Amino acid sequence: DNSVSLLTNIHTLDLCRNKRITDNLVLLLTNIHTLDLDENGTITDNSVSLLTNIHTLNFENNITITDNSLSLLTNIYILCLFRNDAITDNSVSLLTNIHTLNLSCNNTITDNSLSLLTNIYTLNLNNNNTITDNSVSFVTNIYRQTS
């Protein structure tokens, strides 16, 4: 944590499967735009909720980030919730700036939130059993959909 904390102007950080970097570091990365937390169990809502400049967030198989922090990150444009069951409609429905959304193998996000996200251009629904035609019909900007 000590050496990376000197990089306060870093814009992209990949912490996939990293168990040594903690919230202490992420709290310092106020300029970060892209954060990848695939299978990372050490970064929590405590730090992620403060990353208001973030544009791209990847939470694949991550159980430590919840609706509590995601709902505050309204500048997100790209969000990956692949195999993530800790995030629900409660927070995703508030992220109206999202352009790219990956809900592959995600069974917690439903039509309730997707129908409100009308700025989506890319939508991934591979192996998703909760999204139906009803909500996808509201997202009229889609130019790339996989299902």
Image: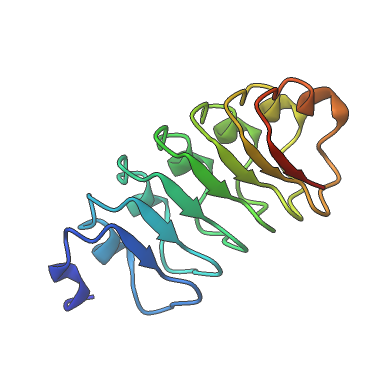
Q: Residue furthest left?
A: 6
Q: Nearer the viewer, residue 92 or 24?
A: 92
Q: Nearer the viewer, residue 34 or 145?
A: 145
Q: Is residue 49 above or below residue 32?
A: above
Which scheme is used to colour this image of the protein?
rainbow
Q: Is residue 2 left or right of residue 33?
A: left
Q: Whole-percent x and y of residue 77?
A: 47, 39
The image position of residue 7, as x and y in percent, is 17, 67
Asked if residue 9 lies left or right of residue 32, the reply is left
Residue 137 sits above or below residue 32 on the image: above
Q: Residue at x 86, y 32 (%)?
A: 132
Q: Is residue 120 above or below residue 27?
A: above
Say which quarter of the image contains residue 92.
Answer: top right
Q: Position of residue 76 (x, y in %)?
A: 44, 39
Q: In screen coordinates, is 6 left or right of 57? A: left
Q: Residue at x 25, y 56 (%)?
A: 27
Identify the image quadrant of the N terminus.
Answer: bottom left
How many labels sit on residues? 0
Picture residue at 61% right of the left edge, 26% below the top: 117
- Residue 59 pos. (x, y %): 55, 57
Side of 17 relative to 140 (left or right):
left
